[in-house]
Image (cartoon, rainbow, N blue to C red):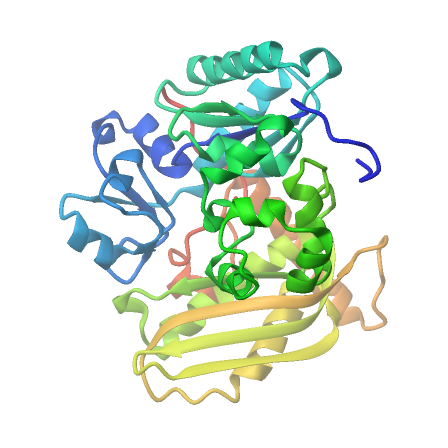
Amino acid sequence: MSITTPPKDFLTMFLDMNSFFASVEQQVQPTLRGKPVGVAPYIGNTGCIIAASKEAKVYGIRIGRVGDARKICPNLKIIEARPALYMIYHKEIKNVIESFTPFYTALSIDEFAIKLSPSDQNEEKSVKLALKIKERIKDRVGDYLTCSVGIGPNKFLAKVAGERKKPDGLTTVRISALKKFYSTLVLTDLPGINYRLESRLKKFKIDSPAVLFNSSLADLRQALDHGGRLWYYRLRGFEVDDHEIKTKTIGHSHVLPPELRSYKEAISVIKKIICKAGYRLRQEGYYAKGVSITIKFLNNELFSLGHLFSPFCDTKSFTDNAFSLLKKCQWKEKPIFVAIAAFDLIKMQGEQINIFPEIEKSKAISRAMDEINDEFGTNTLFPASVFWGRDSAPDRIPFGSPRYEIRN
């Protein structure tokens, strides 16, 4: 939408699944229902909770270390994350939304923005549509799954509205009521404002959403440079966030459990996450020119290095580049965390033939392995050097074909 066109009420619906990963686990494991649950890629005390159930949030548990959460709630049940399972439910929720409208965007695995059709752009019909979608998700996807819905003039305000009533809420916000709406919030209630940005705003005496809303365009540009202009229009209901997010890096990281805190096992895990990142690189249609690697050790020493190379997308080149950086790492202590990333990405424009035949052979091998793993499941085929770490670094995003079934 152009900023020269006045915004209108009831243009956008924002749907946010409540405690999605944890709720899916409670859906497929009924014995977990009503109990505090945390989902983590690694369930040991050094792992990190990436999702907490509604019951766990009552204790103040959200994202954070597993060990810290267990101290707060000793009866907390930690479940190892199963991204492929969550993606199945994501797709089923998409199917429900598509049964009502094709005008939607999946913003993440558990968030959806819906552009309301002209016939639904009023309070009565938009609320009725939201209630139907909520009901059908429960009927067709899972009776333990709930979502919060916000309806507003743009995605930003619809999302803020949806956050006001959780879980299972439904909130609308009108342009005429924005002044009152912002008076009920604090700065960090607004998506995009973290504690650092909050501190910056307060230096300019902007200490609440109401003051932010009432600030002039000139004041906001002084405080936030070009971002101030975006905030000025975003807060007033203009759609200024309709842009494609450009992928900057593709990578993976993993906290090593105690049994993998040695050179041999850590190297195997690094090779596995290189395979995962290489797969994503090809699936998303990129070549990379840079590689970075980070290793944290038990004594808090950190090795971190990045470098530019010739563009690549095959796993062998990715591995060779990463290990050329690893030669500079001194392993004096036990490794506890590893991360790898491909950066300086170039979108593939057709097939680029490399003048070196060994590179073309490696690309063909990588793609053949991708096809086999897509067909028969993750880790059906993997390099022998990954053997020791093949069960580590569980997927945080779908990797290969999902192998789960939905159960109600």
Q: x, y percentage for residue 286?
A: 73, 57
Please identify the quarter of the rendering in which residue 371 is found: top right
In this rendering, position of residue 59 left or right of residue 187 = left
Tell whether 328 sits left or right of 166. right
Q: Quadrant of the N terminus?
A: top right
- From the viewer's perspective, is residue 165 above or below residue 276? above
Q: How many labels were placed on the picture?
A: 0
**Of residues 18 and 377, the one drawn nearer to the viewer in this rendering:** 18
Residue 111 shows in this picture: no
x 23%, y 38%: residue: 36
Quarter holding residue 59 = top left
Residue 157 against residue 129 in the figure, above or below: below
Q: Residue at x 74, y 45 (%)?
A: 243
Q: Position of residue 81 (x, y in %)?
A: 37, 45
**Image coordinates for residue 249, horizontal then vertical, percent:** 63, 62
Residue 311 position within the rendered picture, expressed as x and y whole percent measured from the top left:
76, 70
Name the residue located 34 percent from the left edge and 81 percent from the top edge.
300
- In the rendered view, does 158 fall on the left or right side of 312? left
Q: Residue at x 30, y 30 (%)?
A: 26
